[in-house]
Image: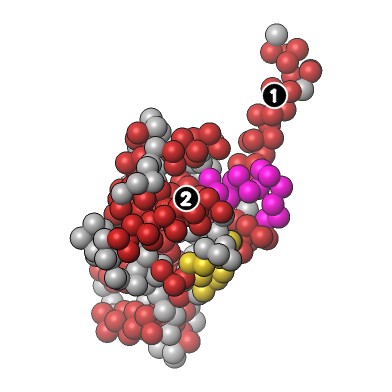
Amino acid sequence: MKQMIDKFLRYLEIERGMSLHTLRAYRKDLELFAAHAAKDADAVEMLDVRGFVARQIKNGLTKTTAGRRLSSVRSFLKYLTREGYLTANPAKLVTTPKAERHLPQFLSVDDVFALIERTDTIGFIHARDRAILELLYSSGLRVSEVAGLNAEDVNTREGLVKVRGKGKKERIVPLGSKAAEAIRGYLTEKILLRKKSSVLFLSKRGSPLSDRSIRRVVVKYARLIGASDRVGPHTIRHTFASHLLQAGADLRVIQELLGHASLSTTQKYTHLDITHLMDIYERAHPLSSEEKD
């Protein structure tokens, strides 16, 4: 099965343009499945797939992780079916484990302002960190998208950012005036230190910031305002989407800004909005107040 897995991963890399991080995740999932099935790819049956998912859950994995591994196996077997190695996809009828719904964590407007204001505008590191935080909240980018930006991708005059998202799909998203101002300040510091790299965000030594380094920047300032240790770049992305929805933005617009392929991925934010509305109701409705009294 190993040769078939390698062939599938090459297809994902070349034809689908998937990132190295995604390819590593696929490889891990498929190697686990291969070890469980212990047979050639063209001999895989539905019971092998179902047993694999059941074992993942029995071993203590969450239903979300088990479902993701099933998705990897399903995609692999679909590829083999299309290429003629299998007559039918044996994973097609295997049900995805129903995961518990967890609402995304997000910050209040006051918390976001406090987070950004803990940075400074003077000095390369301070200006860079402020620009990162402003950009994350202004445009709702994934951390990998921020790390992948070049200076030429950001048009501070027009207020636009060209983003390369999942599968190398490009989209244009708005850039708020505060974020544009912070990025201009950072670029000035970058020039003063003679950092000539085309990559937008750099370390003090001039090397591109990794996803992990950007995550550390967010965690650093979140701790300074007393926020949860779980706050990271993805929290700010959730916050961006939640605040737009609460302000009345259309769900389709939010989907486009976030770069979600499916509207169902974006719809989880409607639950956050309902929570927000219920909170206002509880505090404002006269009968609700009387019941509490």
Q: Using the numbered discs, state the Cα–Cα distance from disc 2 to disc 1 in whole angstroms.
A: 32 Å
Asked whether, in this view, residue 8 is left or right of residue 142, the answer is: left
The amino acid sitting under disc 1 is Glu
**Which residue is rendered at x = 40% and y = 88% of the image?**
85
Residue annotated with mark 1:
282
Q: Quadrant of the rendered structure where residue 272 is?
A: top right
Q: Residue furthest right?
A: 287
N-terminal label among 2 and 1: 2
**Secondary structure type for disc 1:** helix
The stretch of residues the image draws in magenta is: 237-251
Q: Quadrant of the C terminus?
A: top right
Asked whether, in this view, residue 151 is left or right of residue 272, the answer is: left
**Which residue is rendered at x = 34% and y = 72% of the image?**
198
Asked whether, in this view, residue 38 is left or right of residue 122, the answer is: left
Task: Estimate the x, y position of residue 256 in percent, counting from the top left.
Answer: 61, 64
Q: Quadrant of the N terminus?
A: bottom left
Residue annotated with mark 2:
134
Q: Residue furthest left?
A: 205
Is residue 244 covered in magenta?
yes
Q: 185 or 60: which is nearer to us? A: 185
**Which residue is rendered at x = 37% and y = 42% of the image?**
120
